[in-house]
Image: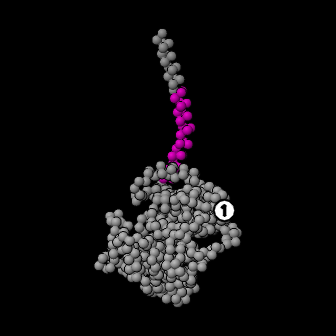
Amino acid sequence: MKKGIGRLTACLLCVCLLLSGVFALGEETAAPALTVEADDAAAQDAQNGEVLEDPDALAGETDAAAQEDEDAAQEDEDAARYVATATAQLKVRREPDKDSFGNGSIAKGEMVYILELGNEWSKIDTGRNIGYVQTRYLSDIREYSASQGASAATTDADGAAVVVDTSSNTPETFQEKFKAYAYKTVVARREMDERSASAFRITKYSEVTVGANQGDWSYIRYKNSYGYVPTSALFKWDRIDPYAGDIPGCIKHIGLAFVNHTTDIKSYDDNGKEVLKTVNPGSALAVDSLDDLGRYPLPYWRTTGYVNESDVGYLLPVVPWEDAHSGDLISCMSTFYAVGIHTLNYQGRNYNIYLGSSFISGTVMQPGDTVNIYDVMGPYRKSTGYHRAPIMSPGALWGYGGGTCQVNTTLYNALIQVPIYINWRKVHAEVGIYYCPVGFDAAVGGGDITMIFTNTLPYAIRINYFMSDGCLTVGIFKV
């Protein structure tokens, strides 16, 4: 009996050993796949480790891996189906309704990514946010190419396809032309195609160096890694090389329109008519090319306004800087501010705009001269003549010199239309300020809150302001 029990026990042990061998064999055959996958992930982490680690990331960002999953899911949901070109500066709406709140703007001639194409309204992605624009203001609508990307092939003036040559975009030949910042967390691609392999991830508000702008893509360097990002995903541009070319989103005006009587600036973007502002006779407005309806478009805050050709008594044209003669206007810019608000603080702001611009107006810069705007317009104190006015500060609602930021911002937007080097500037906040597009403002204040620029043109320039109630205009002239 005992022998029988012993033999049965031995048999059971053999069966267990055999089964354990089978399970072990199963684990060994599955293990290599798991090991390879883990090694690939480790290699990828090692490759991207430098760019994934960002100690300066904004407070409130979630775990990087979770954020990447969320971004990837959102990209799939909001993938571009078509691309088009904006025929005018467009106001983006939060909903497909002309009475809906604004949600950013698109410059004339800018590439538009269309998520949903509609007869009246189209859902689009500006790179900063998602909203709706009227389809009738979009031209050259075409399907997004999964193989080439939206702008690997662009069109010339006649509408013919032009293939973009990217062969010179290599780390070895990279030239520093611009610096910019990511407007949102964005994935850099290996090719100019949103569906191409990801190269690395750029965290929100991080600085990048741009080597080339090609169509609606930019070839960039970020923490020693190189790749392509949509140009619309970048903001706060400035040139590193003053002759690198136009800053994306910068509007170059065609001249100063001097109105011959009291004139309404109107908005027609939503198939209606709205008076944005009324300006005085003689006001100088920086305008864009006359449209087919006989109107001069102009940027008004973050939308587009129009003045009729019949309202303009004289147009002083902008001459390309390389063709200019002595006395020619080479750049101009207008911004607008509120009048008719009779509180002492707002009266003070309007006074400060006049005072600050008077300090700068008439300034002549020889080639190579550098100006720190604080040395010209500051210090911003009661003792220097400034009044108290509303300011943008986390610690105060008002201060002496409020309004001088608009004087400086208007000048900045004129300077960047020509090859003048901006050594230093500060923005008010990442959300910007209402009287100019996001990323195109230049604050003034104490410490390093100033603008410094150098005349890198081959000739002397003169800066002049043109003032009227509610309209601030600056012109840059060749001396």
User: Residue furthest toward the left?
Assistant: 383
Q: Is residue 459 above or below residue 3?
A: below
For image coordinates 51% across by 29% down, the residue present is: 20
Residue at image coords 51%, 46%: 38
Point out residue 473 in the picture as x, y percentages from the top left corner. 48, 78
Q: Residue furthest top?
A: 1
Helix, strand or loop at mark 1: strand
Residue 216 visible from this viewpoint = no
Where on the picture, by quarter, is residue 406?
A: bottom left
The amino acid at mark 1 is Ile
- For the residue pair 335 and 241, the one nearer the viewer reads as 335
Q: Residues within 10 Å of mark 1 (few under 14, many from 20)?
A: some
Q: Verify whether residue 24 appears in magenta.
A: yes
Q: Which residues are magenta?
A: 18-45
Coloring scheme of the render?
one colour
At x 57%, y 60%, the residue is 98
Q: How many marks?
A: 1
| Residue ranking furthest to the bottom | 326
* 316 in relation to 387, above or below: below
- Whether residue 403 is visible, yes or no, is yes
The dominant secondary structure in magenta is helix
Q: Position of residue 446 (x, y in %)?
A: 34, 72
Q: Residue at x 34, y 72 (%)?
A: 344
* Residue 417 colored in magenta in the image: no
Q: Is residue 470 above or below residue 34?
A: below
Residue identified by numbered label 1: 141
The answer to which of 30 and 306 lies nearer the viewer is: 306
